[in-house]
Amino acid sequence: MSELLTLLKREWWEWRRVTVWTVGVFSFLLLLTLVPMNRLSQKIESELVDKMLLNEMDLEELSQEKKDEITFSMSLTNENYNVDDFLNMGKLLSKEKQIIEEKLAESPMTIIKPYSYGILAGFSMIQLFVMFIGLFYFSDSLYKERSNDSTLYFRSLPVSDHWILFSKLKAGAVGIIGLTISMLSIYLVYSQLAIRIVSGEIWEVLSGTLSQINMIDLFFDLIVYQVIALIWMSPLILFLMLISATVRNRPLIAGIGLPILFSITLQVIFGENAFVSEIVNIFVAIPTMINDQNLINSMETVPGDGVDLFASFFGDLFSLRTLGSLVLSGLFYLATLKLYRKNIPTN
């Protein structure tokens, strides 16, 4: 076990900069978007406050200078408004704001559903981005060591080849899950800050409603979902490692580009075929899984024990697709181990 921990530390040392920079840049960009949100929110609040103050004033109490200022402001909109219309508009906006607050308080699902869809959309984008990084990691995992001949050094150590391959698989899996969860945590905090900045006085209503979402259960469900997605993607991961142990150059192009080109060729020549359909089904099954377990679509009222966004994913974990993915991954692993021991040279 100590050998595995040492190998995992080696993987962390090689990829820690990518991980830290990814989380750092992601956090910085999200925080940066809060600046224009804050400015826009302050501008809207300022306009509403001005109109609400004017509501409390009689037209006779306004100075001629203030009337001219209002008239000039309205003339910029190319609308034929007078000062009385402007005051009535302010009263209408104030009443609409009160109605919105009352409706939000009476119907929590009008808040929870859009927020939940935003969380799912953000999580999906984060997952795609992290999986994209994972493609680079697995396609480069063995090729990089072969290209600089460091694989000869590691194979000379009293460490099994299985431990070396397993350390790369485990480091990649833990890295993908850990990076996804870290970025998701940052995104959740960002969503709370964004709502608070934009909503202003409505924040108290929103925060009380959103607190009914079971966040701990949400995190656990997303971790299980991420594990299942990795298992279903494991044939592709092991295939990339097989390519990384075999090709003489450009492992990512050989592992991704050539199969795509081959599939397009088969589709054009033969039309619908089982090979292309099965490849497509592997990628479609993952978003379909999260859609099938989504509870928020049919939910109309808030349950007494809180809102769960997903049902259990354990039915997908113990499924024929999971078994088939593991069997196919095992075959790719044996082929990778055999070619890794041959130590095929690179250019």
Image (tube, rainbow, N blue to C red):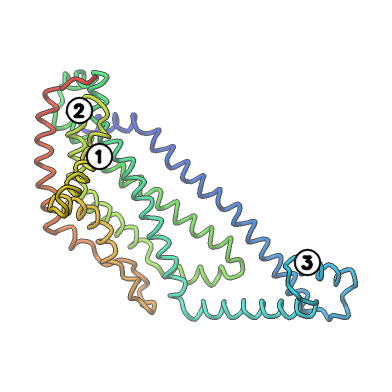
**Viewer-closest of 293 and 132:** 132
Q: CA distance from mark 1 to mark 2?
A: 13 Å
Q: Quadrant of residue 213?
A: bottom left
Q: CA distance from mark 2 to mark 3?
A: 68 Å
Please provide percent x and percent y for residue 128.
34, 49
**Which amino acid type corresponds to the residue marked 1 in the rendered image?**
Ile
Q: Please say if the residues under marks 1 and 2 sit with CB atoms less than 8 Å apart.
A: no
Q: CA distance from mark 1 to mark 3?
A: 58 Å
Q: Quadrant of the C terminus?
A: top left
Q: Which badge, 2 or 3, comes first in the chain's sequence? A: 3
Q: Can residue 2 be seen at all in this image of the molecule?
A: no
Q: At 32% across and 33% down in the image, what residue appears?
A: 12
Q: At 12% across and 39% down in the image, what residue appears?
A: 332
Q: Which badge, 1 or 3, comes first in the chain's sequence? A: 3
SS for tag 1? helix
The residue indicated by pointer 2 is 247
Please provide percent x and percent y for residue 68.
86, 69
Please provide percent x and percent y for residue 17.
40, 33
Q: Quadrant of the N terminus?
A: top left
Q: How many marks?
A: 3
Please provide percent x and percent y for residue 45.
67, 66
**Which amino acid type corresponds to the residue marked 2 in the rendered image?**
Val
SS for tag 3? helix
Q: Quadrant of residue 286?
A: bottom left
**Which amino acid type corresponds to the residue marked 3 in the rendered image?**
Ser
Q: Which badge, 1 or 2, comes first in the chain's sequence? A: 2
Q: Can residue 174 be seen at all in this image of the molecule?
A: yes
Q: Residues within 10 Å of mark 2 (few under 14, many from 20)?
A: some
* Res 256 label: 1
Q: At 29% across and 64% down in the image, what residue appears?
A: 291
The residue indicated by pointer 3 is 73
